[in-house]
Image: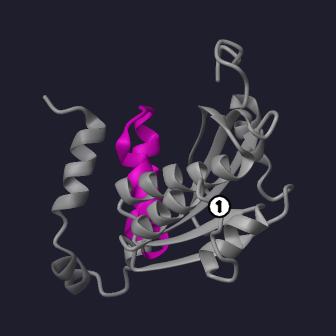
Amino acid sequence: MAKKPELLKAIYNAIQWDRLYEALPHVTRQQVDEFFQELSEGLGQEGEVPKELAARIAGGEVWVCCDGASRGNPGPAGIGVVLATPEGREVLAWGASIGRATNNVAEYRAVIEGLKKARELNARRVRILSDSELLVRQLQGAYKVKSPGLKPLHEQVTELLRGFDQWHAARVTREQSAKADALATQHARPAGKQARNA
């Protein structure tokens, strides 16, 4: 027998939207997504369904708040990523160690991982939020990418962005990206020194 999250996901994917809107013309896609989100949370089980439904809220837009950290620059580096709906509802958050890297490389690696996850969650629009002026300006095209170490990463981000209908990059303060910053810093440690629950 299918697990409840799998069943809920299958039901959501089987919805014939035209027929639903004919029967309930006052209902919006966002209301349906929020309803399924509440149902999935009520199941009390971890799974892909809550993440996917949350990413589709507000017409498929997801915000990717990302940060990178390096101890030594270059040195042991980590990334932190928080995906959220435009209303500020957290979809998921995670951090990872990426070995030895510069701070700028870590910033780019965080964006790459965030965009990959946003695509997995079927988001069609994405807003990248970072406290790195260099990263944001380079993505916007205001700054040239001169570093040989950043060029392939910039190309990878550009390629990932082609998979979205719309994207926007904005600089935020460190306070506004506090959770992503904390996750990146936590994972910017030499191997074997991460916290047990990291």
Residue 177 left/right relative to 1: right
Q: Local crowd at mark 1 within 10 Å, few (<14), some, or many (≥20)?
A: few
Q: Amino acid at mark 1?
A: Ser
Q: Relative to residue 114, is residue 73 depicted above or below? A: above
Residue 30 left/right relative to 23: right
Magenta region includes residue 45: yes
x%, y% of residue 35? 42, 60
Magenta region includes residue 85: no
x%, y% of residue 151? 55, 62
The residue located at (59%, 58%) in the rendering is 148
The residue located at (70%, 50%) in the rendering is 67
The residue located at (52%, 53%) in the rendering is 114
Say whether residue 90 is visible: no
Corner quadrant of residue 195: top right
Question: Secondary structure beneath disc 1?
Answer: loop
Residue holding disc 1? 147
Foreground pick, 155 / 117: 155
Q: Relative to residue 188, is residue 113 depicted above or below? A: below
Corner quadrant of residue 46: top left
Q: Which residues are magenta?
A: 31-59
